[in-house]
Image: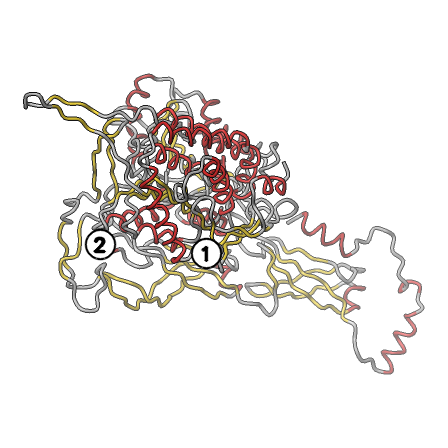
Amino acid sequence: MEIKACLNILGLNQKNNGTSTGKVSFPSSKSIESFSPVDGKKIGSVGETSFQDYNKVIETATSAFKFWRKLPAPKRGEIVRQFGNSLRELKEPLGTLVSYEMGKSLQEGLGEVQEMIDICDFAVGLSRQLHGLTMHSERPGHRMYEQYHPLGIVGIISAFNFPVAVWSWNTALAWICGDVCVWKPSEKTPLCSVACQNIIANILKENDLPEGISCLINGDYKVGEFMTNDKRVPLISATGSTRMGKIVASAVGARLGKSLLELGGNNAIIVTPDADVKMTVMGAVFGAVGTAGQRCTSTRRLIIHEDIYNEVRDAVVNAYKQIKIGNPLDQSNHVGPLIDKLAVQMYSKALDKVVKEGGNIIVEGGVLEGDGYESGCYVKPAIAEANPDFEIVQEETFAPILYLLKYSGPVTNAIEIQNNVTQGLSSAIMTNNLKEAEKFLSAAGSDCGIANVNIGTSGAEIGGAFGGGFGGGFGGGSRRARRGSNLRVRLKLTLEEIAEGVQKKIKVNKLVQAEGVTFRTCPQCQGRGQVTRVTNTILGAMQTTSTCPACGGAGKIIDKRPPGVNEEGLIRKEEIVTIDIPAGVEDGMQLSFSGKGNEGPMGGLSGDLIVVIEELPHEKFQRDGMNILHDYYINFADLALGATIEVPTLKGKAKVKVEPGTQSGKVLRLRGKGLPHVQRHGKGDLLIHLNAWTPKELSAEEKKMMEKLQNSPNFSPTPTGKEKGFFERIKEYFSHN
């Protein structure tokens, strides 16, 4: 289906109101423009929500809640049923929009809408099963019973990777429970949110229901903060990065609100010696490259036993060779684009970092260019051999990068590697050994909310626990030292410095631990770094575990703070940092130096120093990747008679023989005289472009000689066809590059 037709069917225009209470929407002076990562084209714009309009939304939702909570649950379920039916009718246009605005494949876009339909069906059934609990009392003629009441307004913050499904998972269940919803979608996929609001608005209108049951606000994180800091919103359900989750938990916890957090996942597949290799490859490849690695359940790490490491590695590498990258609306392609160019930068940074830490890239990554890749968001899925303790492996990169890790000994060693990250969400084991599978599923096994056997990490089932039921803290949530922020500096380098690599001393103004600061155990979490709540719900006892809002997960807070020290125990200080720049870096490349950034609060880990390379112009050479180019002006007589010339190099000079009869424009190649590659062995070449020098002035004698030669047959151009023209020479040059 054409995207224009989809937009029309879904009621979307070039300019759309991004603030809505249902049937009513509000215009805005500011707007968010949505560009498709598929082709880089603008899809439309959505108005940003102002603080004044946000208050109108909350006031309307508060009023609607008083009506909605009194409506019998089965009747609330009937509204959800009608919404599900509308989604069935609009599955194709909405799924196509999801694919086009987010970049996932069309089948995944349609699948996401199907998940919306499934949760509606699930919620409709639950609307007739909101049971309570009756208990006998010790008092004669008396009994006790529990019943569950709606909370009020549920604030929903969703991420770009599932632009519609996450909202539906939350809102369908909230509606049948008697809650009203306010949705703040990702600013990267705003049109999907307007489309969904249009669909439910029609249902509410047909049933003559009041404004405020389903509300929409749009904008960046500042609009999200309207909700997280608002006491009128008792529950915030947020999906996103671990970093975002900490901020939300802290803000909501500070006002004693409730939060549901579905955060990142540094997901792993364990491959034991008893694994089915074919099944392993299918699960690993789909999990690693599906949605271009932008799922919270995407496979990031493949932990392989040493006995079958080579076999599995080679099989996965061969599978990657068959991957087709391109427009996700074309169902013959396997991998679409990343969400935006910022995501591309993070992808490139991760690849640079794994090499910097000593990893070995066995399937090269890179950003794709040319026809079909105009958006600049298409990248190659990459594979790197790495160690489990690499800092980049411990991080979650939202991109198609798969790390191969080797383990030896029993499966418990692999489980330990898997669990040794802070972002546990989904996990899997590939084995035909029942004991290994049972160990993996036991209390001593995977610490993730989702544990799969002989199937990949990617995906979660409607109605399943998905990381501990409705409890928060899917991923993140364990005690950990808070990490310092990164520092960013620009470094100018000459071509000579780039060729050899160089050690530089840089002056930085960074945050460091201040003297005289003392700490004490956090009274809220008792030093654990997380808080746990157990709540009895219609689905049984649900445990909610989240990062402690008081200490941010550190387990301690500041006791005494000297003057001039910030609330995190840090003070700004100027330092000289020594860094080693590897040979072969390029202009714009970002190098990350671990632990040389701002120091972490509460004695936490230091952030990184991000060095952005700026290559200075050279008076003699031009750079082209690993090769360097030099224009050499040569005497015409030397071209005709032949000569030995002296040309400059990055390390001095070199002598080059010019054969008699050499044509002007000839390119001489000095192999290995170029620049080294920063990520692999080998050097580029020095390319000498010979240009015949034409004298501007001639003496009388020289003029007579030239006039005599002018009419000589040997001086008349008589190309034989063997001589290569300019474009042929350029083509030949690039073919050997």
Q: Quick one: 300 or 133, which is closer to the camera?
A: 133
Q: Which of the numbered marks, if any, corresponds to residue 590?
A: 1
Question: Crowdedness of circle 1 by 10 Å Cα count: few (<14), some, many (20+)?
Answer: many
Q: Quick one: 86 or 414, which is closer to the camera?
A: 86
Horizontal side, residue 13 vs residue 18: left or right: right
Q: Which residue lies under the disc numbered 2?
A: 603
Amino acid type shown at disc 2: Gly
Rendered position, 720 above or below 295: below
Which colour style is shown? Answer: secondary structure
Horizontal side, residue 348 vs residue 540: left or right: right
Q: Could you tell me residue 611's position as x and y percent? A: 42, 60
Quadrant hosting residue 6: top right
Q: Could you tell me residue 231's position as x and y percent? A: 27, 50
Rendered position, 85 above or below 643: above
Q: Which sits earlier in the primary sequence, circle 2 or circle 1?
A: 1
Badge nearest the viewer, 2 or 1 = 2
Q: Residue furthest bottom?
A: 700
Q: Quick one: 473 or 265, which is closer to the camera?
A: 473
Whether residue 616 is visible, yes or no, is: yes
Rendered position, 707 above or below 459: below
